[in-house]
Amino acid sequence: MRDLYIKNGQGFLLVYSLVNQQSFQDIKPMRDQIVRVKRYEKVPLILVGNKVDLESEREVLSAEGRALAQEWGCPFMETSAKSKTMVDELFAEIVRQMNYASLPEKQDQCCTTCIVQ
């Protein structure tokens, strides 16, 4: 089922919890699955660390997220869905990426697929 969502998606937000190291580890195979299904490395994608409002409980350093995003060649953002920190900017950025992407297949989809951990 996830492959179908990926196939039809134009842009992806890979979201992990800053207060859960395992969720950060679990996000890596999801990106691999996206690249496999889309058959293209340059899929519009943003790596997102969520729950920045829980800074005192942080398990995943910002530097870890930035390093992974740099390895993948994608933007990195930290957000808080609870306090709405950087959420509008996140969606504006994924839309911007989708608008400028030049994927090798026809782009007739109209929605963003979010994979949240």
Image (cartoon, grey):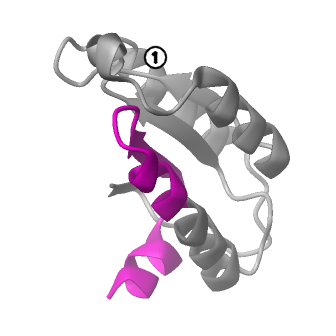
Whether residue 114 is in magenta: the answer is: no
Question: In the drawing, does residue 69 fall left or right of residue 37?
Answer: right
Could you tell me the amino acid type at mark 1? Glu
Position of the N terminus by quadrant: bottom left
- Crowd around label 1: few <14 · some 14–19 · many ≥20 (10 Å): few
Question: In the drawing, does residue 21 fall left or right of residue 69?
Answer: left
Question: In the drawing, does residue 109 fall left or right of residue 71?
Answer: left
The residue nearer to you, when weighing 16 against 25, is 25
- The image quadrant of residue 79 is top left
Q: Residue at x 69, y 58 (%)?
A: 43
- The image quadrant of residue 64 is top right
Q: Residue at x 46, y 17 (%)?
A: 89
Q: Residue at x 42, y 55 (%)?
A: 22
Q: Position of residue 103 (x, y in %)?
A: 76, 63
> Which secondary structure, mark 1?
helix
- The image quadrant of residue 38 is bottom right
Residue 90 visible in the picture:
yes
Whether residue 22 is in magenta: the answer is: yes
Question: In the drawing, does residue 105 fall left or right of residue 1?
Answer: right
Residue 10 visible in the picture:
no
Give the labeled residue for mark 1: 89
Q: Position of residue 40 (x, y in %)?
A: 78, 72
Specify start and end residues of the magenta stretch as a single range. Answer: 1-27
Q: Position of residue 36 (x, y in %)?
A: 68, 82
Position of the C terminus by quadrant: bottom left
The residue nearer to you, when weighing 77 against 41, is 77
Question: Vertical placement of 99 versus 35: above or below?
Answer: above
Q: Position of residue 113 (x, y in %)?
A: 39, 58
